[in-house]
Image (cartoon, grey):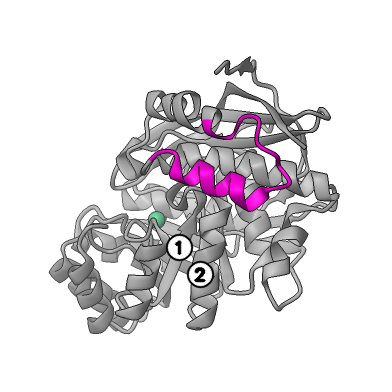
Amino acid sequence: MKIKSISLGYIDIPLVTPFKTALRTVNSVNDLIVKIETEDGMVGYGEAPPTAVITGDTRESIEAAVRGYIAPSILGMDLDDFEAVLEKMDKCIAKNTSAKAAADIALHDLYAKRKGLPLFRLLARKDPAQPKTKLETDLTISVNETDEMVRDSLRAVEQGFRILKVKVGKGGSKDVERIREIRRAVGSKITIRVDANQGWTKEEAVRTIRAMEDAALQVELVEQPVSGHDFKGLKYVTSQVDTPILADEAVFSVEDAERIIEERAADLINIKLMKTGGIRNAQKICDIAQENDIKCMIGCMLESKVAVSAGAHLAAARSCVTMADLDGPSLCSIDPYQGGPVYHGPEILLPEESGIGITKVPAAFEKISC
Ligand code: MG
């Protein structure tokens, strides 16, 4: 079935509260949506957020990559040559992982629909285990003054979240206090993950993590303590602390994941479709992780339901994925879509409809003419 058209649109969804990390503050999800249609009228949707501080991808660069490179490379190809379509798309332009992810997600949505399967069941064919039909996500607590972070954590627990992902990385000693106060407030039954978003030096990371260990704050893992480029620093931190270290900004490509695993530079890997360039490369990282018995998290940028749900389908399909950080839809003040996985507090229920399951995307689409 030939790929007939590719269209672009935008969605703008206000967040419940501003999202703050060591790198940035954001007030709304303003993402690009890619719609791909085959000759028989079937459509698939993908999404990409412009996360310039992490991926380097801006709204303009994502749009230019889709218009100028991705669309011309795959228009007219036969969707049933699925691997060839994905390979051509991946090779048509270097980097630009968010643009590729949007197209890759739309292609996977479309292909799963063509096969009459929910996407997670299609993706699970690569895994020996039965897919999950339900996931539990954490909720992100933005980095703020300690009092505010304690209030946000208590509110999350009231809403039913049992896993908190606390953003730190703004001052090592203050970070220990932040986690100590949150732990004191939420009690011992809540899981606390800490994400430094590259905010520490390697010495500061070791000092801070050890202080958290000495204070018995029961931190499940620490995510990306040092710069994503500082491979040696990441390996050093991993070797110096007991708390498991999760690589995020240090792993974009399949090669990055291979190196981290081979050299034991981190204990765990956070896979995000916007870093890998979509599901195809994320599946390859899962394959390598599974061979080496490494557990993975599926995370997201500030994305809405299309891209986050693609991540949820992958998380459900793969047994190496034991952690879900898929709180994008929970941070949005409205859900403008129809269909797809159900996000109910911390619970994500996978749909049995074919594809990702999303049937309506309220964006004004413009067809790309090549
Ligand atoms: Mg992270």
Is 76 colored magenta in this rendering?
Answer: yes
Q: Quadrant of the N terminus?
A: top right
Within the displayed image, which quadrant is ligand 1 positioned in? bottom left
Q: Is residue 123 visible?
A: yes
Q: Amino acid at mark 2?
A: Cys
Q: Are marks 2 and 1 in contact (CB under 8 Å)?
A: yes
Judge left or right: residue 208 versus residue 116: left
Q: Nearer the viewer, residue 180 or 72?
A: 72
Q: Quadrant of the C terminus?
A: top right
Residue at image mark 1: 270
Q: Can you say whether 247 is above or below 20 in the image?
A: below
Tell me the magenta residue range. Answer: 73-93
Please tell me whether mark 2 sits on a helix, a strand or a loop: strand
Please tell me whether mark 1 sits on a helix, a strand or a loop: strand
Residue 366, image x, y percentages: 61, 15
Crowd tier of the residue under label 2, counting other residues whose Cα lies within 10 Å: few below 14, some 14–19, many 20 or above: many
Earlier residue among tags 2 and 1:
1
Residue at image mark 2: 296
Is the C-beta of the residue carrying label 1 under 8 Å from the nearest atom of ligand 1? yes
Residue 124, image x, y percentages: 71, 66
